[in-house]
Amino acid sequence: MTLLLIASGMRVYREYLLRSIAARFRVHLFHVAEPQWEKQYLAGWTVLPSTIDGHAMVRAAVRLNDSEPVTGVLCWDEGRIHATAYVAQALGLLNGDPAVVWRLRDKAQTRAALAAAGIAQPRSIPVRTLPQALAAAGEVGYPAILKPRGLGASLGVVRVDDATQLRRMFAFTRDTKPPDPVVYASDHPVLVEQCVAGEEISVDSVVQGGKVTPLFLARKIVGYPPHAEEIGHHVDAADPLLTDPALTATLQDTHSALGFLDGWTHTEYMLTEAGPMLIEVNGRLGGDLIPYLGMLATGIDPGAVAAATACGLAADVRPTRRRVAGVRFFYPERNDTTIGAIAFDQAGLPEAVDRAVTVAQPGAVVSPPPKGAVWDRIAYATAVGDSIDECTSALDAAEAALQVTAA
């Protein structure tokens, strides 16, 4: 049974998914370069000029399907899920509606669809210019959130407390670019949104035939205010919100309103005094190793479930353990730091640390937010325990054990 995977992502963040999928499926990879670390997991691959051009990928996918029938198409890269939908559509496979996927990618369309369905969410106004942004902030009120209309990973997201801050930060949000040239709604590229207060969570769910099954709930840790940089997450297999009637109902209503029927989603909410308010929905597996934390905490294999769902097969979503898992991401202390050497002192890592991984290579020039972003993370650590406090202590130790020398 052949699964077509569109792009692989960074090894340190996504290899666990590909390893799991390859144990159950023949995996054919569409990529822009010859695979390297991926080869051990692949039955075949095709090198293409672009994995963002959906129409071009369709031609290659049809040729592949003629020689080796494809059962499902999967992508976990935000910039490529829309193009992937064209491939699935051409092959008559699940999650093959580009309009639905674009409704998730374009946050203004998401807001409009959910407003029509009465889903609780912050008020949001798309704008093109600074005067429009100032007028929109006057409507939604201060503090307000400036957010790029179609990016992910909290890129360009910033809180502004008054008109002076908005004037200073508008260009930062407007001009934040993704790593790949995805074109989206450039006529009104910025959303000015009501700032809602509370704890931010994310829910990774599998959707089959329109029925949403939440699997992993992550509690987000955000740093570098007024920017919204995600610096860590915790997943508790026994989190009561996973079965909370209000949250599960709004999760189902959200997907129904967006028309998302089959696949994996990563949905973010703010837990306010008035109840959960929808922040955004992503039509892919969560990033930041959240599905990996879910696997550590629950025993549910996200790669196996996502691949089975893409192929229209029954997915095993029964938890086999009840633990807590956490991740923390580390950044350089100063802008434009050139990494000379970086390593964890293994003697300083407690048993609860699951992985301690260096991401930056010697010679890399990196910065903390806001100049830097997710690609400027220099390392991360994951931990498993019986409580969030136990994981936090282990991650504190990992942070103390990280040794960085600037060149």
Image (tube, rainbow, N blue to C red):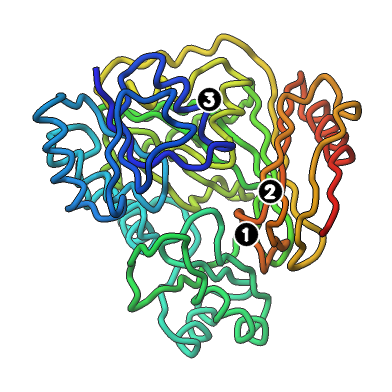
| Residue drawn at point x = 44 percent, y = 86 percent | 129
**Distance between the alpha carbons at the discs numbered 2 and 1:** 16 Å
Q: On the rendered image, what quadrant is the N terminus found in? A: top left
Q: Does 349 sit left or right of 80 as displayed?
A: right
Looking at numbered disc 2 in the image, what kind of residue is underneath it? Answer: Gln
Mark toward the start of the polypeptide (3 vs 1): 3
Front label number (2 vs 1): 2
Q: Is 48 rendered above or below residue 299?
A: below
- Left/right of residue 56 with respect to residue 75 in the rendered view: left
* Element assignment for label 2: loop
Q: Which tag is nearer the camera, tag 3 or tag 1? A: 1
Q: Residue at x 30, y 40 (%)?
A: 30
Establish if 163 lies above or below 260.
below
Q: Earlier in the sequence, mark 2 or mark 1?
A: 2
Between 53 and 104, the one nearer to me in the picture: 53
Q: Could you tell me which secondary element the residue under label 1 belongs to?
A: loop
Q: Identity of the amino acid at label 1?
A: Ala
Residue nearer the viewer, 108 or 224: 224
10 Å neighbourhood of mark 1: few (<14), some, or many (≥20)?
Answer: some
Tag 2 residue: 361
Q: Secondary structure at mark 3?
A: helix
The correct choice, above or below, for 200 with respect to 315 in the image is: below
**How far across and how far down the image is residue 257, in percent?**
30, 46
Q: In which quadrant of the rendered view does residue 64 lie?
A: top left
Give the residue furthest to the bottom.
131
Mark positioned earlier in the residue sequence (2 or 3): 3
Badge 1 is on which residue? 373
Q: Mark 3 highlights which residue?
A: 243
